[in-house]
Amino acid sequence: MLRALLLGLALAVPLSSAAVPAVGVAQSAGHAYVGGIPDLPLMPGLQELPDSGLVFDKPGGRIVEAFAQGSMTPEAVAAFYEETLPQLGWRHEGRGAYLREGERLELGVGREAGRTTVHFRLFPQ
């Protein structure tokens, strides 16, 4: 009897774990995130500028700067993040500024030569 129970458990465990998708894969499939800020989505249509940012982790918190560009309007970028960030726990604190769990996120958005540039800054509050 014990042997049959152990055999049943041995077969059930691999089957049940195979049926559950890996959380990290499901959450990141098809979505881009801002480099250095793994839970900050990169607006569709924006492309991060390589070698333009920095990540500095210190005892008091992390400091991250990243830049991205796209052809959408600055207003579209602002609207995207105003809608998206509160769903991720960020509290809107004014134009382009958000707070969450002791961190401040600032978004600087500008347009030049038909391209919109977004400057992401994350630092301890």
Image (spheres, rainbow, N blue to C red):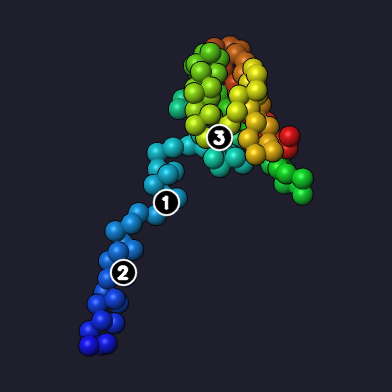
Judged by depth in the image, the label closer to the viewer, 3 or 1, is 3
The residue at 63%/21% (across/down) is 96
Camera sees residue 19: yes
Looking at the figure, which quarter contains the C terminus?
A: top right
* Above or below, 84 relative to 31: above
Q: CA distance from mark 1 to mark 2?
A: 17 Å
Q: CA distance from mark 2 to mark 3?
A: 35 Å
The residue at 60%/40% (across/down) is 37
Q: Is residue 68 left or right of residue 23?
A: right
* Above or below, 28 relative to 97: below
Residue type at mark 2 is Pro
The residue at 30%/77% (across/down) is 10
Q: Is residue 102 left or right of residue 30?
A: right
Where is residue 23 drawn, in percent x and y? 42, 51
Q: Which residue is mark 1?
A: 23
Q: Nearer the viewer, residue 91 or 23?
A: 91
Q: Is residue 2 left or right of residue 59?
A: left
Q: Secondary structure at mark 3?
A: loop
Q: Which residue is mark 2?
A: 14
Residue 89's label in the rendered image is 3
Image label count: 3
Q: Secondary structure at mark 2?
A: helix
Camera sees residue 53: no
Residue type at mark 1 is Val
